[in-house]
Image (cartoon, rainbow, N blue to C red):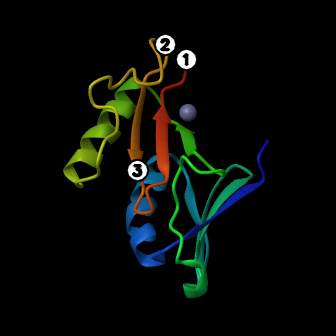
């Protein structure tokens, strides 16, 4: 069980706008908020986003580099994946692997993949049953 995950972001406000509705939709609730950060919690696991300090912003995130590649969340169902995909498209979010969507993760894996404002890959996957 993961306790929490903390991610540094280039523009906290932009990340809040991107993540808030999505995490709420996925069952998270708003948890902590302070000047340089925010978190949402689900059960005992929370997800934190913190404004990266200016001096560390010269190198941006890239998922092909060493480090985090993507964050994957459970949707409630395949229909939920579809609903979220529609909302993401409406919000202008770039969906990844559209040629293979919703099976880009494999035939048995019903999911949508996209990028957050810092291009961190996000996956939302339907439970197996
Ligand atoms: Zn994955």
Of mark 2 and mark 3, the one earlier in the sequence is: 2
Locate the C terminus and report the quarter of the image it occupies: top right
Can see residue 75? no
Instruction: From this view, report whether residue 61 is shown above or below residue 42.
Output: below
* Secondary structure of residue under mark 3: strand
Of mark 1 and mark 2, the one earlier in the sequence is: 2
**Pair 3/1: label in front:** 3
Q: Which mark is residue 108?
A: 2
Between 111 and 11, the one lying in front of the other is 11
Between 58 and 119, the one lying in front of the other is 58
* Secondary structure of residue under mark 1: loop
Label 2 CA crowd tier, 10 Å (few <14, some 14–19, many 20+): few
Label 3 CA crowd tier, 10 Å (few <14, some 14–19, many 20+): some
Instruction: From this view, report whether residue 87 is shown above or below residue 113.
Output: below
**Pair 1/2: label in front:** 2
What is the spatial separation of the Cα atoms under label 3 and label 1, in whole angstroms?
23 Å
Instruction: From this view, report whether residue 47 is shown above or below residue 115.
Output: below
Disc 3 C-beta below 8 A from ligand 1: no
Does the CB distance between marks 3 and 1 fall below 8 Å? no
Find disc 3 in the rendering and name its residue: 115
Residue shown at the point (44%, 12%) measured from the top left = 107
Label 1 CA crowd tier, 10 Å (few <14, some 14–19, many 20+): few
Instruction: From this view, report whether residue 97 is shown above or below residue 39.
Output: above
Does the CB distance between marks 1 and 2 fall below 8 Å? yes
Marker count (numbered): 3
* Secondary structure of residue under mark 2: loop
Disc 1 C-beta below 8 A from ligand 1: no
Find disc 1 in the rendering and name its residue: 128
Residue, far top: 107
Horizontal relation, residue 42 to residue 58: left or right: right
What is the spatial separation of the Cα atoms under label 1 and label 2, in whole angstroms?
8 Å
């Amino acid at each position: 069980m993961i306790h929490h995950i903390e991610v540094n972001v280039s523009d906290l406000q932009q990340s809040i706008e991107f993540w808030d509705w999505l995490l709420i939709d996925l069952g998270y609730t708003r948890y902590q908020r302070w000047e340089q950060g925010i978190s949402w919690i689900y059960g005992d696991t929370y997800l934190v986003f913190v404004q990266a300090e200016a001096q560390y912003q010269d190198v941006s995130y890239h998922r092909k580099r060493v480090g985090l590649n993507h964050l994957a969340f459970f949707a409630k169902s395949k229909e939920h994946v579809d609903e979220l995909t529609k909302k993401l498209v409406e919000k202008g979010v770039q969906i990844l692997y559209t040629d293979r969507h919703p099976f880009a993760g494999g035939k048995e894996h019903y999911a949508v993949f996209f990028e957050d404002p810092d291009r961190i890959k996000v996956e939302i996957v339907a439970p197996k049953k």
